[in-house]
Image: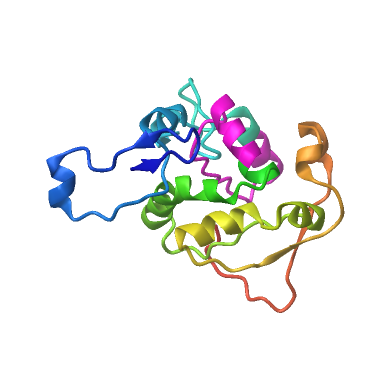
Amino acid sequence: MIKCLWCGQPQSVFNCLEFYLSYREINNQIFCKSCKSKLDIITITNSCAGCCRPTESSDSFCLDCKMWLKKYSKTTVNHHALFKYNDFAKEIMKQFKYQGDYILAHGFVNILRQIIQTRYSEYVICPIPSNQSNYIKRGFIPTECLLFTAGIPYTSLLKKVGKGSQAERKRKDRLGISQPFELIEGIEIPSKIL
């Protein structure tokens, strides 16, 4: 019997004859059905073509992406959010990122691998670095933790410059600051980067 990573409720992975006959690997670090159902997966059909924010209109881009496309006409907006940022997702991210609960990364391994393999297999994966003070507090970089736990190779192309955290700023302030990252010197830039 294994326990849910979030709520700790016992759960059985051997719930049907089909599982016994499938020869599937037992993943012993998962969320239970109840917790998994609270993670609202974003599908391409109900989201903005640029950022995957859920939309209710027939427009292909949300207002924010339209603004970015107008401001940076030569840049394609292509952000892929996996889940709606509901209260449950906020709690998990808070526990993972700010309380340093590294083990929660295991709950996202399957979906992360699936998305990378199906949509971004030709891309070089480049994690966005954290600022030094957050790294010292946590002891890990969240994006690198997720990629490492999922067994997805990645390449560091960027370094953080300046001080302060994006999370400490209001949205308007984040949009107004200068670029907080620089390319690491001597790195060849791949043609496709995620």
* Picture mark count: 0
Q: Is residue 70 magenta?
A: yes
Q: Residue at x 34, y 36 (%)?
A: 11
Pick the residue in front: 25 or 66: 25
Residue positioned most to the top: 56
In the image: residue 106, left or right of residue 87: left
Residue 175 visible in the picture:
no
Q: Quarter holding the N terminus?
A: top left
Q: Is residue 185 magenta?
A: no
Residue at the image point whose x is 47% and y is 50% from the top: 106
Please, which residue is most extreme toward the right here?
A: 163
Relative to residue 180, is residue 82 depicted above or below?
A: above
164 and 120: which one is in front?
164
- The residue at the far bottom in this view is 186
Where does the image place residue 175, in percent across and percent down from the top left? 77, 39
- Residue 91's x, y, as percent? 60, 32
Quadrant (top left, top right, bottom left, bottom right) of the C terminus: bottom right
In percent of width and height, residue 140 lies at 67, 57
Using the image as rendered, state which of residue 123 and residue 15 is in the foreground. Answer: 15
Where residue 143 sits, quadrant-wise, is: bottom right
The vertical placement of 105 against 44, above or below, is below
* Residue 145 lies in quadrant: bottom right
**Residue 20 visible in the current orientation:** yes
User: Residues in magenta?
Assistant: 67-95
Q: Residue at x 67, y 76 (%)?
A: 187
Indicate how the structure is coloured in the image: rainbow
Residue at the image point whose x is 58% and y is 69% from the top: 155
Relative placement, left or right, of 129 versus 87 is right
